[in-house]
Amino acid sequence: MIQAEIVVSLKRLLSERVRVPVARAQALALDTPLLKDGLGLDSLDCVELTLGMEEEFGLVFDDSEDDWMHHFSCLGTLAQLVLIVKGELA
């Protein structure tokens, strides 16, 4: 799976699981901030998105990491996380 395919899925998950309007989700660039002053996701949104990602990609994320929110800084870092957990990016 390539990053572009993951980003398409992430945008769909943002619309379906976090209720981001479809047009807004589709307009997101790889470097658009997802938290606070960007898209405005909060920690509960991130949990819901994580659950959707686990279902969508068949993954289990390690929740023992202290600062997991940095993965949600933008679509690019979130897509990289999926690739890393899938073992497709070192």
Image: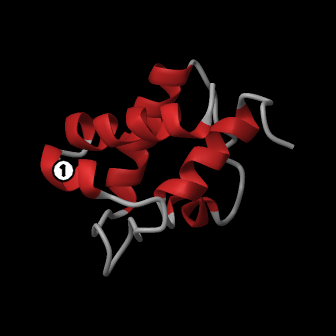
Q: Residue furthest bottom?
A: 37
Query: In this image, 13 relative to 73: left or right?
Result: left
The scheme the figure's colours follow is: secondary structure
Report which quarter residue 51 is drawn in.
Answer: top left
Query: What amino acid type is highlighted by mark number 1?
Result: Val
In the rendered view, would you say 49 is above or below 34? above
Give residue 64's position: percent from left, percent from top.
Answer: 71, 49
Residue carrying label 1: 20
In the rendered view, would you say 73 is above or below 1? below
- Image quadrant for the C terminus? top right
In the rendered view, would you say 35 is above or below 50? below
Report which quarter residue 85 is drawn in.
Answer: top right
Crowd band around label 1 with a 10 angstrom C-alpha radius: few (<14), some (14–19), many (20+) = some
Query: In this image, 40 relative to 66: left or right?
Result: left
**Camera-nearest residue between 23 and 59:** 23
- Image quadrant for the N terminus? top right
Give residue 12's position: percent from left, percent from top.
Answer: 29, 35
Q: Residue at x 36, y 41 (%)?
A: 48
Q: Residue at x 26, y 56 (%)?
A: 27
**Camera-nearest residue between 12 and 41:** 12
Q: Residue at x 18, y 56 (%)?
A: 24
Q: Residue at x 47, y 59 (%)?
A: 30
